[in-house]
Image: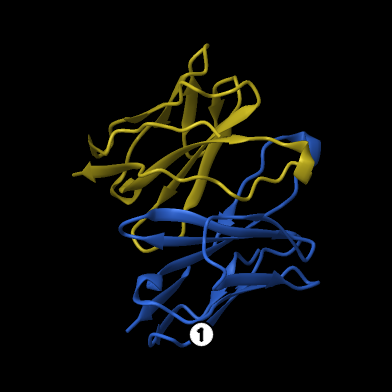
Chain colours: A yellow, B blue
């Protein structure tokens, strides 16, 4: 699986957009980009995923560059409750296991601190 | 709907003992994965089960084992506990997406094991 590189930490002012970058320069054509976050002492929470196109849901937007070597997670209006460690993961979609890929490889992630 | 339930939430054991942790996945989810989280190593994949079969295993010693029952509930066992086994053990379940796209994990709150 391709590896990812994320900044160790970032700060964001409450109410502003938080833009979290992720580099995945060795990503292959059939690997998805996933984002999860982990609020202190809780289990990781799924945020969003994408393959080629930009994606948006109620939580965030995911912008993937055309060459797919990097992506940005955007939290449009960060709140104090968005303070967490954000993980960017690339994972192969394989039909060998019916599409399920339970063994995600988590890196160190980015610790996002939203400040009032 | 109910989320992923892990029991017990907290437990304390002594070196040499063994421990069993339980995970009840979201209803309808057939895949269950286990992860270990420590401050030093971060989140590390232990194993994944689907339809009572282990189909992926991480790089952990044989003291770590697991199983899945016909109702998709899963247990993991750690024998001959060591101090370094102190960690947050997270269970995640997922719904097989097949050819429809990438899969998403839903994590439980974890079982925090302290080995003295």
Is B95 situated left or right of B90 in this image? right
User: Eyeballing the image, is A60 above or below B21?
Assistant: above
Q: Report the residue that reaches farthest toward the left.
A: A116
Judging depth in this view, the residue of B50 and B82 nearest the camera is B82
Work out whether B9 lies above or below B72.
Answer: below
Q: How many marks?
A: 1
Residue at left 41%, top 60%? B37
Q: Name the side, left or right, on which A87 lies relative to A30.
A: left
Percent position (x, y) of residue A44? 46, 54
Q: Residue at x 55, y 46 (%)?
A: A104
Residue A111 x %, y %: 29, 44
Horizontal and vertical percent position of residue B18? 51, 85
Q: Residue at x 47, y 19 (%)?
A: A69
> Dot 1: what SS?
loop
Left or right of residue A28: residue B98: right
* Residue found 47% across the figure and 55% down from its top: B44
Crowding near pointer 1: few (<14 within 10 Å), some, many (20+)? some
Of the 4 image quadrants, the one containing the C terminus of chain A is: top left
Q: Where on the picture, by quarter, is residue B76?
A: bottom right
- Quadrant of the snapshot with the N terminus of chain A: top right
Q: Can the viewer see residue A89? A: yes
Q: Is residue A44 above or below residue B66?
A: above
Label 1 marks which chain's residue? Answer: B
In the picture of the structure, the residue carrying the numbered disc 1 is B18
């Amino acid at each position: 699986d391709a590896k990812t590189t994320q900044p160790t930490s970032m700060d964001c002012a409450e109410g502003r957009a938080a833009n979290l970058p992720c580099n995945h320069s060795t990503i292959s054509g059939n690997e998805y980009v996933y984002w999860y976050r982990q609020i202190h002492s809780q289990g990781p929470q799924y945020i969003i995923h994408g393959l080629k196109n930009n994606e948006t849901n109620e939580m965030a937007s995911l912008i993937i560059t055309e060459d797919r070597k990097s992506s940005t997670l955007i939290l449009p209006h960060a709140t104090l409750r968005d303070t967490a460690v954000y993980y960017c993961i690339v994972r192969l979609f394989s039909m060998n296991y019916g599409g399920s890929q339970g063994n995600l490889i988590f890196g160190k992630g980015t610790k996002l601190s939203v400040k009032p | 709907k109910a989320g992923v339930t892990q029991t017990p939430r907290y437990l304390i054991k002594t070196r040499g003992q063994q421990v069993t942790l339980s995970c009840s996945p979201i209803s309808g989810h057939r895949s269950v994965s286990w992860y270990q989280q420590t401050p030093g190593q971060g989140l590390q994949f232990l194993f994944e089960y689907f339809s009572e079969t282990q189909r992926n295993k991480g790089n952990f010693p044989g003291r770590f084992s697991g199983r899945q029952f016909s109702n998709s509930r899963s247990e993991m066992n750690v024998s001959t506990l060591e101090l370094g086994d102190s960690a947050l053990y997270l269970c995640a379940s997922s719904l097989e997406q097949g050819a429809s796209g990438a899969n998403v994990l839903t994590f439980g709150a974890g079982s925090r094991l302290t080995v003295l």
